[in-house]
Image (cartoon, helix red, strand yellow):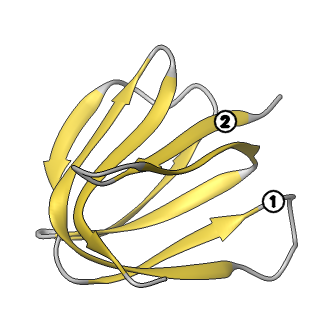
Amino acid sequence: MALHFELVTPARLVRSDDVYMVVVPGTEGEFGVLEGHAPFMSTVRDGALKIYKTDGAAPEEIQVQGGFAEVGENGLTVLAEHVEA
């Protein structure tokens, strides 16, 4: 099974993909999200999102600045104030 992940900014959809796991830099600390994670919301601090395409794969990192993360039945959505291209 895969986790549906979306990364958006106020201006555009940056990424929409099915992945194994995403590690989010939350303001209370980093947290990992896998398929089937319990629903919740968190604020996001400046840092690197780590995206794992498959189990055991090296992570792809995307720098984000601020925002919110929401885990729901549709997967993980990160609304970042700014994303480093």
Q: Is 39 located above or below residue 66 in the figure?
A: above
* Numbered mark located on residue 62 in the image: none
Whether residue 11 is visible, yes or no, is yes
The percent coordinates of residue 27 (x first, y second) are 12, 70
The percent coordinates of residue 33 (x first, y second) are 51, 48
The percent coordinates of residue 39 (x first, y second) are 33, 24
* Numbered mark located on residue 3 in the image: 2
Residue at horizontal 81 percent and vertical 82 percent from the top: 58
- The residue lying furthest to the top in this view is 73
Front-lying residue, 50 or 32: 50
Secondary element under disc 2, as helix, strand or loop, is: strand
Q: How crowded is mark 2: few (under 14 residues within 10 Å), some or many (20 or more)?
A: many
Image quadrant where one finds the N terminus: top right
Q: Give the residue type at disc 1.
A: Lys
The percent coordinates of residue 5 (x first, y second) are 57, 42
Residue under circle 1? 53
Earlier-in-chain disc, 1 versus 2? 2
Question: Image check: 34 left or right of 55?
Answer: left
Question: Image check: 4 left or right of 71?
Answer: right
Question: Image check: 25 left or right of 41?
Answer: right
